[in-house]
Image (cartoon, rainbow, N blue to C red):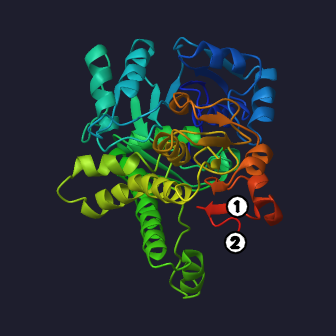
Amino acid sequence: MNEVFRGRLAIIGMGYIGLPTAVAIATRGIDVIGVDVNPATVAAISRGEVPFVEPDLAVAVSGAVAMGRLKATTETPEADAFIIAVPTPFNEDRTADLSYVKTAAEQIAPKLKPGDIIVLESTSPPGTTEKIGTWIGALRPDLRMPRDGQAVADVYIAHCPERVLPGRIMIEIVTNDRVVGGLTPKCAEKAASIYRLFAQGEILLTDAASAEMAKLSENAYRDVNIAFANELSMICESLHIDVWEVIRLANRHPRVSILSPGPGVGGHCIPVDPWFIVSAAPRLARLIRTAREVNDRRPHDVAEQVVAKAQRFRSPTIACLGLTFKANVDDARESPAIEVVSLIAKALPEFDILAADPYVHTLPKQLREFGNLRLESAYQAVERADIVVLLVEHEPFKAIRHTRLGGKVVYDTRGAWR
């Protein structure tokens, strides 16, 4: 019979993955302590509140806190299992910045006792889970770290990458299959006992490096396909062909499914994860590198198109609709929309630029330097604009009537108003 975890669990990092995971486990009758370096985040969770927007999460957090199953703190506690869900950004050379993971491991180390489980959920390059064992082993020589070919270990270390979509996290965290890779088979089995508490999808056991590479491959695959759509869009623009019509017709082929183009690729995964593969094998990852470069370049192409349209006017007002990285969420991490707006404002300092987003209530830090840019409601922005640029297909934007766009130059990067 498959083992199911029973004990006290600590989750390091109360962000978009850590907090939903904490709730999913706490509502299954497990005591969960959420750890975060931000006191405001800890205070909000302790009140049963959510520090960011995600459907269905607020009710779940409130319930878990009210039941006494979920607590939050800035200090790493003693526990029977630890999940690391901290950021893994990249450095200037696009190699992985593992400093947050290392800090979490170092904070866990003094709390460990024989039999404890450590799971890394943060998306990481192959070999990161093994490094956790090395970092902790250096601090706790009294504990035997798990190694291949070694039958006995005092602690169990594994990787279980998150694979959820913002806006659907509370659904997918339960229904999606999970990949659990251990430093040893026993580590994988021990880690899987945690996810059996709430996961309805299949739990697939493997080694840690394969689990790490599988997550990177998922996002690199998506990135390559998005790059094809974005490059096709640029080619069609240059030939004065409607890319949306081309994609509609091509996708009628039974074995073709071209994705939709956009102003770039954002979020915490797809713009970052492919670079981890490139840095691991730079000579071989040519297609993955090129796709990333195409998608990184896309905001510049969009901004150049808008600037070219604006220069036909004497003194136009430009409305840019959308600042988050995807529709119907407040997450602006690595948002291509913000980059597009920044490039337009920088190129056209003498023109008024109006930004609108129902999920963003203050200008992001990257945009505050521009004196010609301000945040407005979508209604006011569209009403005043000569040029309207749709960057994110939020539902309120999709509902804007075509009659309100009459007489304006419209650049719909998402195909939402076709």
Please name the residue shown 53% across and 16% down the image.
37
Residue 89 placed where, x, y %? Answer: 40, 35
Q: Nearer the viewer, residue 273 or 78?
A: 273
Under circle 2, the secondary element is loop
> Quick check: can you spot residue 113?
no
Dot 2 corresponds to which residue?
418
Q: Position of residue 292 (x, y in %)?
A: 36, 55
Q: What element carries label 1?
A: loop
**Between discs 2 and 1, the one toward the N terminus:** 1
Q: Residue at x 64, y 15 (%)?
A: 40
Q: In which quarter of the image is residue 51?
A: top right
Going by the numbered disc 1, the residue's amino acid type is Lys
Q: Are marks 2 and 1 in contact (CB under 8 Å)?
A: no
Q: How crowded is mark 1: few (under 14 residues within 10 Å), some or many (20 or more)?
A: some
Q: Is residue 216 left or right of residue 384?
A: left
- Judged from this view, the residue extending furthest toward the front is 314
Which-is-in-front pick, marks 2 and 1? 1
**Residue depicted at x 63% and y 49%:** 318
Q: Count up the numbered dots.
A: 2
Visible residue check, residue 24: yes
Quadrant position of residue 367: top right
Check disc 2: other Cα within 10 Å, few if <14, some if 14-19, many if 20+. few
Query: Disc 1 designates what residue?
Result: 408
